[in-house]
């Protein structure tokens, strides 16, 4: 009987530590609130619905069995679609849609999608990766950011 209880407890513990099935993405507003409350950095993914590279990032990179746990355990994941969202991240500040659009006027700044940014708070510079990332490079960039 003791063996049955022991193995049952071990099984429960093992299954409770399985990796997540998907990343729970937040809006910028929700993510910022949670990041401040939990004192965790944010991983910000900038995408648009029609972008094939963005879709590949979501399906192949963020769902990678080695990348997903790194994100879910160490970051508050945030997704921003500049075509529809109302709050944005640029350099070291958050901007409303109105001001963000002004900032991307021709000659000032170009939005590249996909973009992945790691943001650790007011006292740290964001670490920004433009373009399609592969799982190996993203993993390495996550580890580099976390060592800072």
Image (cartoon, helix red, strand yellow):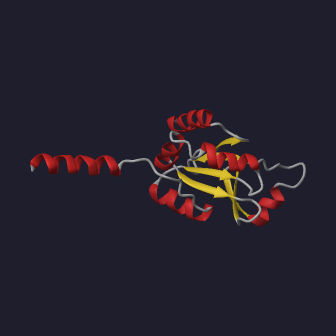
Q: Is residue 12 above or below residue 61?
A: below
Instruction: Write the residue at 63% across / 48% down.
Output: 59
Indicate the position of residue 90 as horizontal and vertical percent values. Answer: 71, 52
Q: Is residue 108 above or below residue 137?
A: below
In the rendered structure, the answer to whether residue 16 lies left or right of residue 89 reads left
Indicate the position of residue 89 as horizontal and vertical percent values. Answer: 68, 55
In the rendered structure, the answer to whether residue 33 lies left or right of residue 82 reads left
Can the viewer see residue 112? yes
For the residue pair 81 and 23, the one nearer the viewer reads as 23
Indicate the position of residue 115 as horizontal and vertical percent values. Answer: 70, 46
In the rendered structure, the answer to whether residue 58 lies left or right of residue 24 reads right
Instruction: Write the residue at 47% across / 53% down.
Output: 39
Can the viewer see residue 125? no
Q: Is residue 93 above or below residue 142?
A: below
In the rendered structure, the answer to whether residue 147 lies left or right of residue 109 reads left
Instruction: Write the residue at 65% across / 51% down.
Output: 45
Indicate the position of residue 31 as horizontal and vertical percent values. Answer: 56, 60
Q: Quadrant of residue 61?
A: top right
Question: Which residue is most to the right?
Answer: 106
Question: Which residue is most to the left?
Answer: 1
For the residue pair 12 and 23, the one nearer the viewer reads as 12
For the residue pair 80 and 87, the one nearer the viewer reads as 80
């Amino acid at each position: 009987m003791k063996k049955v209880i022991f193995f049952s407890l071990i099984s429960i513990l093992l299954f409770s530590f399985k990796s997540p099935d998907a990343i729970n993405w937040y809006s910028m507003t929700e993510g910022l609130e949670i990041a401040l409350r939990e004192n965790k950095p944010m991983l910000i993914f900038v995408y648009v619905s029609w972008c094939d590279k963005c879709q590949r990032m979501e399906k192949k990179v963020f769902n990678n069995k080695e990348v997903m746990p790194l994100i879910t355990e160490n970051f508050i994941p945030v997704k921003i679609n500049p075509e529809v969202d109302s709050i944005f991240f640029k350099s070291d500040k958050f901007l409303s849609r109105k001001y963000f659009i002004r900032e991307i006027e021709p000659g000032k700044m170009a939005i590249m999608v996909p973009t992945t940014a790691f943001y650790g708070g007011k006292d740290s510079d964001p670490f920004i990766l433009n373009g399609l990332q592969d799982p190996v490079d993203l993993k390495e960039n996550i580890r580099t950011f976390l060592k800072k």
